[in-house]
Amino acid sequence: MKVCQHLLLFVLFLPLSSKCVLCFSELSFITEPSDVTVIPKDPAVLDCQAHGQPPVTIKWLKNGVRLAESEHIQFLPNGSLYIPKIKHTKEDSDEGFYQCLSQNKYGAILSQRSRLTIASISEFVLHPVPMVVTEGSVARFSCAVTSSPPATITWELNQSTLPLQTDRITVLPNGVLQIHNVQLEDAGLYRCVATNIGSRLKSREAMLTVNQGAGPKPRQRPRIIAGPQNVTVSLHQTVVLECVATGNPWPIISWSRADSRPIDVYNAKVLGNGNLVITDVSSKHSGVYLCRATTPGTRNYTIAAANVTVLEPPSIVERPESQTRPRAGTARFMCQAEGVPTPRISWLKNGEEVHLNGRIKMYNSKLVITQIIPEDDAIYQCMAENEQGSVLSLARLIVVMSEDRPSAPRNIHAETISSSAILLAWERPLYNADKVIAYSIHYMKAEGLNNEEYQVVIGNDTTSYIIDDLEPARNYSFYIVAYMPMGASRMSDQVSQHTLEDVPLRTPELSLTSHSSTDIQVSWQPLPAKVSRGRVSAYRLSYRTAADNTVTSVELPQNSTEYVLEGLQPDTIYLLRMAAATRVGWCEPSAWTSHRTPKTSSNKAPILQLEPLNCTSIVARWQTAPESVAAQGYRLCYHEEGQPEQPNIQLQAQIYTYTISGLDPRRKYHVKILAVGQAGDGYQTDQTVSTPGCVSARDQLAAAPPPPDHVTVLANNSSAVSLRWSRPAFPSGKAVSYTVRCTPVGTHNASAIRYIQTTKQSVMVQNLDSNTRYEFVVRLHVDQMSSPWSSVVYHRTLPPPAGLRVTLIEDDTALVSWREPTEPNVVVTHYTILYASQKAWVAGHWQIMQREGSHTMALLEKLEPGNVYLVKISASNQVGDGPFSNIVELPLKRGNNHRSKNPRHSDSFPDTTVFSDGLYHIDQRSMTGIIVGVSIALSCIVMCALILISKGRPRKSSSHKVIAVGAGEGPHAGVPLPNERHVENVEALIPMISGHFLDTKGGSNMVINIAGPVNKNQNKRWLLFKREIRNPGRASLYEAGKTILRYEERLGSAPLPPSSREIIYGPLHSESSHTSEGSQETGDSGHYSNEESNEEMSNPSTSQSSRPESFGPDDGATVAELNIISDSGDKVKTFHCHVLLPLLGLYYPMWSSFFKILFYFRG
């Protein structure tokens, strides 16, 4: 019984996923507190509402300290915090950061940080200063004040509000006042006034003195007197980049970006005579902006630059997922966040900071919990913070408990095998060893803090394992856990073991400097333990000249970090290399590094420092050596080890740093720099540095590249969209590729999700369903790393017009109506209506009518009576044509001479309104008539069959008999129709002119038809259902002794029943068909035509139509006449079967097949 209970628990816990975990323990915030600014002594409310399994309690924290409820601090029933009267004194102030803590029986969660700010204005940090200017020049005043919220700056002239009616005066949002083309009346006392919701403050006054101009001004080059300044702003704020220039003639101000990207024209505008103002800034506005003042008509210009940094609050791009883990298991929670500046990530457990220890560790931003215990069952939150705010994401850890767990593995023993391998052995658990299904080996470095724990799972068929991916000369600790289906054992005792030393992985990186023309100073940094793979015992420095192969070596002690080679030849290239050794032996020496000893010079070598910025960039910093002559510039070059040198980079004298980017990871680079002076080149400094790996052997992945941004979707048509995006800004010399994911919104079918790979920054996504909402995301791939998915972009493909309805309002006029699109932001420019008779549709001819996008109705006029018309419609907008709607059929009446006043009904015909569902609704009366007709038709067919069998002669073995059913006649004539069945004829057939029969026995030249012998020139028609022969030249098939079945419609017979079109022609083509031939625009066979065929227009009475005009039982009867030509050709046997024509037409294929079989067996 207990085993069954355990099995049930295992089955219940096994399928738990991250989504199901929260099904029963959900605890989340509905409303979180947000930043608020208040005035002292005013009330304030900070909202907080949580959702979860009751009871849910909410508590509040201020600056991380829990608040107690009092008269001043009140907790509302819905969880919000209410402060009746804001305090703001030196001793006590309500200003600070607030968070609410929500808790239920499953754990607790902390809200985002909310800042309560008390409105205030400090003293002016910058007052306007007096100015003296010349008439016609530029005057500029500025002031600055610290305010919360930001203050609005206005200006006063002589203590009165400054009028701004003239274009000469500009007040920028940052408080700067500009007066262009200064006039004498502009002189006076100016001051600025700062105002916010808290108070109002005035600056000191400053005098503007205007001197009268003296004569014409000389020609001057442009000069920027107030250029843009570097600025850092938060999201959605306003940036002001000032640019004021003077010159004669007056210069033209223009703006551009240093990265050549276009300036956002929607949020940026030029204020005054050249100031750039960007409102509602976002991350895309970050960058370096260039103000250019140009003299008109010349190439004289001056440039000023400023950097705009947009701060962004943190956002979590990879959220932790809830997990279910057994006791003694391991849980790993991932969390990645982005923002400007880079957010700091911390972890909370039930609303409190996680205490890291040997079991719980953080690796970068990942939280790892090993050897899980019941107390680890909690709600964990990843919190990302920067100066702009905080954001949190939660995940639940559920610890599964079980009984009858095995005891821990015993007698753990570790033995070193090599510098990278250790053998681990153990004994099976003492209890329940037979239930063990696997062992988990856990190991980590024993020295240092926050070392990551690694895990290997093996089967239960062994009690030893070799771990062979360890680092040399390292001490490791190990423990083992046994697993059974219901959980894990306790951890075994820990053991430690040290790996052996190995030769160094590589040599130190050298720095070469010459302090005179006869020496080289060689310096290096000690190898890190990960590279040395043991304790370095010695170094060996080797050198020679480039022209001599004689190598000189010097062995240096283990603690050496520099050595000076003296007595060298001036202006000579020397090659140097180094090797390092441990007790195991020497490593491979490094590649030769070249250095030229300088000529005699007064410029000493710069002091160079290299630092890897990331896996593809190096930052070089230097400074001049003491007592050196002032340099006029610097010359820097670099190259990868073993590769030729890159061209020299010329740098100005005031530059002391340079970033080398576009490098490869894990490569060694040589960097050289020397000072250039009047006396020539100075001494050279040469250093070597290695770029780190983007993915190291044991460390986590380097920071993933940012996702593509500015993803936009543009519809090409109803089934295709064009997707574009921008490559994010990050240094990389590798090839970049992209993956586009296209998902129908709300789909649960994995096969409906499409992935498209491309190396371009745009892609065409085709074969989409119309009227479907899709979501598109893009991710970037570079150097075996992938970025997170970009932000989701939604797009709905254009739907066909809905509610298409066709109503007959006159004998030859129909009204077409439809509904406007209900989708938002869909502006229809025009509608296209296609309509055609059945005959024209078979030939592929449609008539086109277009209506403006504001119309939802159209009239179809001059329709031919007796035809069935097919109608469909599509909508178009500025990006293309949409799909066509389903086809709607409209049958027209035949033979009425008067116009009906009822647009929907007539005296003898039912309602002919048809809807786009393609269904006809048959009433009870019509259904009864059809049933009776079918019964009578079957009886007649049986009678006719018996007569033919009894009258027929034995079939000759040499005779060939086949049925020719009005070749060239009827709806099949001349047009290949859908679902048409062609009878395969394997007999040798003789062509015969359609409509006449020749007796080929005896050579008679007589032409015989149904009425008997006729003349050759007599023009007779062989009719089938009163259908005119479309192709007189088409041949019939006949042989001597062949029996021919022929139908002829009597005068006054009724037309075909309504369903004959579907049976004879097959189902109509619709827009959803993927096999229709012809025009791609319509999806139907054939092409567009604005004119009907001549035959249809000139012969409406004979135009092909099989659509019914009545279903009732009053339809006239039809005679089916069976004409049989005997073998001798001298006698025609005629049989008449009275059948309802609607039923005969309805079952025409069946009758045809029936008679073919009948005559085949006639004998």
Image (cartoon, grey):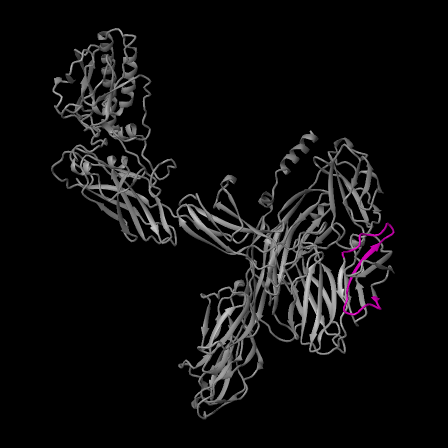
In this orientation, which residue lies closer to the viewer: 1031 or 729?
1031
In this orientation, which residue lies closer to the viewer: 731 or 714?
731
User: Is residue 199 depicted above or below 507 in this figure?
Assistant: below
User: Is residue 943 depicted above or below 556 in this figure?
Assistant: above
In this orientation, which residue lies closer to the viewer: 1018 or 782?
1018
**Visible in this render: residue 101?**
no
Say which quadrant the N terminus sits in: top right
Name the dominant secondary structure of the magenta segment.
loop
Left-right relation of 768 to 1030: right
| Residue 1074 point in image, percent of width and height | 39, 37
Residue 540, quarter of picture: bottom right
Instruction: Identify the residue at the far front of this view.
Output: 547
| Residue 1043 point in image, percent of width and height | 24, 14
In this orientation, which residue lies closer to the viewer: 904 or 785?
785
For the magenta stretch, what is the residue range?
564-591
Left-right relation of 775 to 434: left
User: Is residue 1075 depicted above or below 1021 in this figure?
Assistant: below
Q: Is residue 45 magenta?
A: no
User: Residue shown at 52%/47% (left/top)?
Assistant: 741
| Residue 1135 point in image, percent of width and height | 18, 14
Say which quadrant the C terminus sits in: top left
| Residue 593 point in image, percent of width and height | 76, 60
What is the number of callouts on the image?
0
User: Residue shown at 30%/17% (left/top)?
Assistant: 988
